[in-house]
Image (cartoon, rainbow, N blue to C red):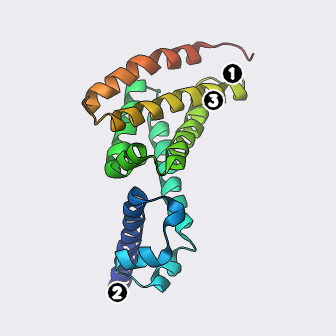
Amino acid sequence: MLKKNKEDLRVTKTLQNIRQTVVTLLIEKPLSEITVTEIAKRAQIQRKTFYLHYNSVTDVLAEFEAELSHDVETMLTEISPFSVQEFLTGLNELLCKNYAFYQEIFCRQKNSFLSTQCKNILQDSLTERLRAENKKIAPEDLKMYAEFISSGIVNIYGTWFISGQKLELADLIKKIQLIVQPLFTQIKTLKTKN
């Protein structure tokens, strides 16, 4: 039993090492230029070790996206009743979890599809949450509202990163809350499907 735990820990560390290496490389260059050979060299593993866990470099990114999606969905389901302040605080906690990665995504724009993926993950999760909050709104309207809100939030964070974070993160949360709170309030009070 102890041997299995050591092996599990070794696998976990290897996976973390591979993921961190991919994140580091994404900061330096576009995904299309990253090779398994380069990942293996930087992570100090054999190529076959990489292929034990992943089929391609994009599989590593897909795993990261799935984890982010799960984290956002989990965070949203834990907020009951829905609170914009708790929602934004939760987003900031997720942001801080991989702060350097997000900073580079927004500042370098080499991987702009990643910021689009972040927006899509947030949009999908918000659509589901808004649907749960108000079942009387047409699904296409909910999706539109969620897209507007998520695009705005992701763009505000992007601008904040690019500007060199001159505003404290806590103050940024307050400003975003002032912008999106009325939108959420209005969406919750809509009565009929249009």
Location of mark 3 (residue):
131
Q: Residue at x 58, y 74 (%)?
A: 55
Asked if 161 appears above or below 25 in the picture, the reply is: above
- Left of 127 or right of it: where is 194? right
Label 1, residues with CA under 10 Å away: few <14, some 14-19, many ≥20: some
Q: Are marks 3 and 1 in contact (CB under 8 Å)?
A: yes
Quadrant, the C terminus: top right
Q: Position of residue 147 (x, y in %)?
A: 59, 31
Location of mark 2 (residue):
3
Earlier sequence position, callout 3 versus callout 2: 2
Extreme residue in the right direction: 194
Q: Residue at x 49, y 51 (%)?
A: 111
Label 2, residues with CA under 10 Å away: few <14, some 14-19, many ≥20: few
Q: Which numbered disc, 2 or 1, marks the residue closer to the eye?
A: 1
Location of mark 1 (residue):
137
CA–CA distance in space, label 2 to label 1: 54 Å
Query: Amino acid type of disc 2?
Result: Lys
CA–CA distance in space, label 3 to label 2: 47 Å
Q: Nearer the viewer, residue 163 or 126?
A: 163
Query: Amino acid type of disc 1?
Result: Ile
Q: Position of residue 125 (x, y in %)?
A: 56, 39
Where disc 1 sits, the SS reads: loop
Query: Amino acid type of disc 3?
Result: Arg
Q: Which numbered disc, 3 or 2, marks the residue closer to the eye?
A: 3
Where disc 3 sits, the SS reads: helix
Q: Position of residue 108 (x, y in %)?
A: 40, 47
